Image (tube, grey):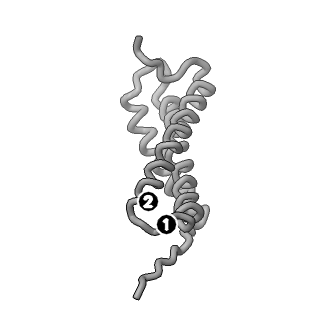
Amino acid sequence: MSIVSTFQPYRESLRTTLTRTIAIAVVVGFVFAMRWHGSASLATRWAVASILFLWPSFGGHWVELWFLNWLRPRLPEGRHVQIAARLAVWFVAGVAIGTAMWLTGTALLGRIFFRFPP
């Protein structure tokens, strides 16, 4: 007797997705803005930080949907394969999202964003 695993596609309304991901970006953006010292007002820092954190919250949602609904059904059902694939997807997506955040921050602030110490 074999157990057949069927993957159910993950579905969620766009309204629910937007509500959750924007709320996450606004809350994390506020926490980040409180700790981010600069010449700009708190409202400006909060707005910029919230826009930046939309990348991991909203973009990350779509990465996870792609993994769950497209890639996972095409992978072998072994748990180790699933874990390795998810880690690989999130590593690549994390680099892409981090780069997008850096580029967005640089575009919004008009200067190099997140300079690394020498």
Which SS class for mark 2? helix
- Circles 2, 1 touching at the beta carbon (< 8 Å): yes
Q: Is residue 110 above or below residue 6?
A: above
Tell me where residue 7 appears, x and y as whole percent.
Answer: 51, 73
Q: In the rendering, at what x and y percent does residue 50 appear?
A: 51, 39
Q: Is residue 117 left or right of residue 48?
A: left
Question: Does 44 sit above or below residue 111?
Answer: below
Mark 1, secondary structure of its residue: loop
Q: Quadrant of the N terminus?
A: bottom left
The answer to which of marks 2 and 1 sits earlier in the sequence is 1
User: In the figure, is residue 104 to the left or right of 86?
Assistant: right
Q: Which mark is residue 14?
A: none
Residue visible at 55% across and 33% down in the picture: 99
The residue most toward the top is 118
Label 1 CA crowd tier, 10 Å (few <14, some 14–19, many 20+): few
Residue 73: x %, y % from top left = 55, 68
* Residue at far bottom of view: 1
Where is 109 relative to 88, above or below?
A: above
Which residue is pictured at 43% across the width and 38% down the height? 30
| Residue at 39% over, 64% down | 79
94 or 77: nearer the eye? 77
Task: Locate the C terminus and report the quarter of the image it occupies.
Answer: top left
Three-letter amino acid code at disc 1?
A: Pro
Residue ID for mark 1: 76
Q: Tell me the amino acid under the disc marked 2.
A: Val
On screen, residue 26 above or below 40: below
The CA span between labels 2 and 1 is: 7 Å
Q: Is residue 48 left or right of residue 32?
A: right
Residue placed most toward the observer, 38 or 66: 66
Q: Percent from the top left, x then y, of residue 48?
A: 54, 33
Name the residue that disc number 2 marks.
81
Neighbours of disc 2 within 10 Å: few (<14), some (14-19), many (20+): few
